[in-house]
């Protein structure tokens, strides 16, 4: 009888795992299964190449992944130009006949394909990981964890309940406004060196299933020069920042900020006149204007067109802008502007050298 009482007491008073302890235990066990943190840390880069099939036929996918949020996503389809998206930190661009700056949503879509890097760097790719409960995933009972991804959206991670092996994840498409769910299921794993990595995965969305068979996976065999950011991309990204800075200057009524991006030989072409002014005169002119109005809109009607020379020393930006403001006597004014601005890289700093402006009716 005393033995039974002692056994019941142990059950009643044994500490239960907290939600955070469950998360830690699942992740720690999983890391050990795929090879251990020691060998994950040694993987500075992972290269993979997959034969793929989707609802619209066969294609291929090539992925370069490296530390420092570096990714190259290349999709190869017969009789079509290759689609190449590249990520280096917070710089994103596409590479084809022309280089073009992209955005974090497309970068997220590209990086969602680097499954070998994702599975070895879960806690870098996702944060605020929490225990949700138990749920069936891919026909197996799993532990379901929620996490916040790089776009600050929720991703759900699934681990097999009995083994703690990672089964896959679900998240929302960053490119679809209808909150479309994308499901990644890991079908098979393969030992590459000391690490166990996915060799076959399935992506599912409303279009159907996309199966990626990775026949080539290599660790630490990427020349990281492939991630180097082209000078033209650095220039375009900076010119976009300067474009946004002008908007900030208008809403903050900050003439000094606006004039800070102008070259010493800045020239204006407007109303049939070519004029050049000293910076102090420009600051006074703009500030007098800003003090008389309050901006409601200063927004692009279409994205600015930016062209940069091959040597990334000169550029032009074509702008179509909708400007809405109120005057001191509370009158509301709406004007459509279009202008062409030229820029020059002077000692490593991009400055506006001229602007030719027109006003729409």
Image: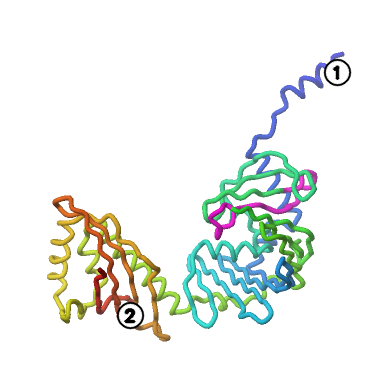
What segment carries the magenta color?
159-179
120 on left or right of 5: left
Residue 245's tag is: none
In front of the other: 3 or 108: 108
In the depicted structure, whether residue 69 falls above or below residue 7:
below
Q: Dividing the picture into quarters, in which one does residue 298 lie?
A: bottom left
Residue 345's tag is: 2
Q: Position of residue 247 (x, y in %)?
A: 30, 62
Q: Quadrant of the C terminus?
A: bottom left
Identified at 23% across, 56% down, the residue is 325
Q: Position of residue 342 (x, y in %)?
A: 30, 79
In the depicted structure, whether residue 306 falls above or below residue 43:
below
Q: Secondary structure at mark 2?
A: strand
Identified at 64% across, 37% down, the residue is 19
Name, please, the residue furthest toward the top: 1
Q: Magenta segment: does it hold 167?
A: yes
Q: Position of residue 301 (x, y in %)?
A: 36, 65
In the depicted structure, whether residue 322 falls above or below residue 164:
below
Q: Magenta segment: does it hold 46?
A: no
Residue at image mark 1: 3
In front of the other: 55 or 59: 55
The image's colour scheme reads: rainbow
In front of the other: 160 or 348: 160
């Amino acid at each position: 009888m005393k033995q039974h009482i002692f056994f019941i007491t142990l059950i009643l008073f044994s500490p239960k795992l907290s939600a955070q302890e469950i998360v830690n235990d699942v992740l720690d066990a999983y890391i050990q299964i795929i090879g251990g943190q020691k060998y994950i840390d040694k993987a500075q880069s992972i290269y993979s190449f997959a034969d793929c099939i989707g609802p619209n036929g066969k294609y291929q996918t090539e992925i370069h992944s490296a530390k420092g949020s570096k990714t190259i996503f290349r999709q190869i389809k017969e009789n079509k130009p290759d689609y190449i998206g590249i990520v280096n930190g917070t710089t994103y661009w596409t590479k084809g006949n022309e280089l073009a700056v992209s955005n974090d949503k497309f970068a997220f879509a590209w990086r969602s394909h680097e499954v070998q890097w994702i599975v070895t760097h879960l806690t870098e790719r996702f944060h605020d990981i929490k225990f949700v409960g138990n749920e069936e995933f891919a026909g197996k009972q799993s532990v379901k964890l929620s996490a916040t991804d790089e776009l600050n959206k929720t991703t759900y991670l699934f681990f097999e309940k009995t083994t703690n092996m990672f089964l896959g994840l679900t998240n929302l498409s960053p490119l679809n406004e209808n909150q479309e769910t994308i499901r990644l299921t890991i079908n098979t794993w393969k030992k590459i060196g000391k690490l166990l990595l996915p060799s076959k995965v399935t992506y599912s969305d409303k279009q159907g299933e996309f199966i990626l068979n990775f026949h080539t996976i290599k660790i630490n065999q990427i020349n990281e020069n492939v991630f180097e950011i082209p000078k033209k991309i650095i220039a375009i990204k900076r010119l976009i920042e300067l474009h946004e800075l002008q908007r900030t200057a208008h809403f903050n009524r900050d003439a000094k900020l606006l004039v800070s991006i102008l070259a010493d030989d800045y020239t204006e072409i407007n109303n049939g006149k070519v004029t050049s002014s000293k910076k102090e005169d420009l600051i006074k002119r703009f500030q007098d204007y800003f003090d008389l109005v309050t901006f409601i809109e200063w927004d692009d009607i279409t994205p600015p067109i930016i062209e940069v020379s091959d040597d990334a020393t000169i550029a032009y930006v074509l702008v179509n802008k909708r400007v809405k403001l109120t005057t001191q006597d509370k009158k509301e004014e709406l004007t459509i502007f279009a202008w062409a601005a030229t820029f020059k890289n002077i000692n490593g700093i991009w400055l506006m050298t001229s602007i030719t402006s027109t006003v729409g009716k």
